[in-house]
Amino acid sequence: MKNAYEILKERGFIEQVTDEALISGLFKNGPVTCYIGFDPTASSLHIGSLVPIMALAHMQKSDNKPIALVGGGTGLIGDPSGKTEMRQVLTEEQIQKNASCIGKQLSRYLDFSGGSKALLLNNAEWLTKVKYIEFLRDIGRHFSVNRMLAAESYKMRLEKGLNFIEFNYMILQAYDYLYLFKKYGCILQMGGNDQWGNMLAGTELIRKVTAKDAHAVTFPLITTSHGHKMGKTERGTIWLEGNLTSPYEYYQYWVNCDDADVERFLKLFTFLPLDEIVVVKKLVDAQLNMAKTVLAYEATKIAHGVEAAQAAWHASAEAFHSRSVDSELFPSSDIPRNDVHNDISAIPRYRISKKDLEGGLLITSTCAKAGLTQSMSEAKRLIEQGGIYVGNRQVKTVNEKILVSDFEGTKELRIRKGKKKYLVIELGN
């Protein structure tokens, strides 16, 4: 069997390593304890965090011990890495609330039960207890200011000004690694490329304090084939929290990916075996669309569970008249392969009353209120471009309204934006 490092490398996770020979050797000598940090700057992680999350999941699946470290302490300062301006300073209450929400999200991907398979930690537990003078004497003395200023995470901020609070971030992250190394035997830190300087600072601190080796691995910045940042759409960020981005919307993000991204995304964001994924490069047309369907289903299942993934699949299949997935494609996937059901329960819904319809509902206003468009202005623009449909009719003018007759005796009316975005209007009493 291949070890976790070989799996991550094969699937495209690995970018930079401190010493590949030594790291490869670690995995041949038994289980490895590793960690990745997550900033609690919001109440939910987003798709941009999926690569590190999936890396930890692969580590656990290969019987290693991952540590997911939520930065409740470092979040009080803010990481300057990859930023041209200082991050917004959040209150301690906001950060701890965000940290709690993120911990719940991570538990969908990792098994923290019992603490023997994986650990969920918050660095506020030790960083908020640090005594300043002792910290400067015992830890700060190991850092060269000249070397710190040469790090990419600081260089890009020097022109606009790097404040003293942010300057401490590298030292605190390095101390996190030392703490985890000493207490939990953690010998591998993983993270994004923008964290390389901070991670090297950690390995050097461990070497200076303990005279032992620790290691670091970075992941590449994942962009789409068009060079766009992962998880950014016309409507905003794709969140991992279902209350912010519904499972159906999450599913739609993946099923609408570019043809050139399908194979790479299947490797990174699903657990399907590589021998099934490699065939994607030979697929075209309908079969390639089936591969996108499998990607969307598997990614949604990991994030939101089997039931949500099946509901999103059924709703999407009914809405777009998709065919079932070929039974010979991706046999390891449990995606439904029977005939399409008429289940549109996962499509976003907006409820109105019969009284609302007495004088008709302005379509532009309804689209904006229901969230199908970001504003009435966008709805008007789309109507002028022929991009809004009520039922099967194309809306011709911005003054058109939704009428009782549009429901044709039913309790539901479907509104479509463009080719692939749907909303169901429910008619109440």
Image (spheres, grey):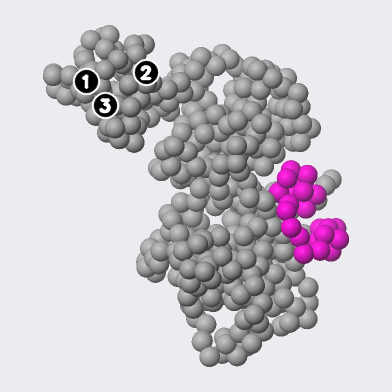
Instruction: Please give the name of the residue rendered at 31% of the width and 16% of the height, measured from the top-left corner.
Output: 395
Q: Position of residue 93 (x, y in %)?
A: 37, 66
Type of amino acid under label 2: Gly
Q: Which residue is mark 2?
A: 386
Q: Residues within 10 Å of mark 3 (few under 14, many from 20)?
A: many
Magenta span includes 26: yes
How far apart, in angstroms, are the residues tagged by discs 2 and 3?
13 Å
Q: Is the C-beta separation of discs 2 and 3 under 8 Å?
A: no
* Residue 243 numbered mark, or none: none
Instruction: Please give the name of the residue rendered at 81% of the width and 63% of the height, measured from the top-left corner.
Output: 19
* Residue 399 numbered mark, or none: 1
- On the image, which quarter does residue 192 sit in? bottom right
* Element at label 3: helix
Q: Which residue is mark 3?
A: 364
Q: Is residue 419 left or right of residue 205?
A: left
- Between 396 and 419, the one lying in front of the other is 396
Type of amino acid under label 1: Asn
Mark 2 and mark 1 lie on one chain; the one further toward the N terminus is: 2
Give the magenta-colored segment's residue range.
5-29
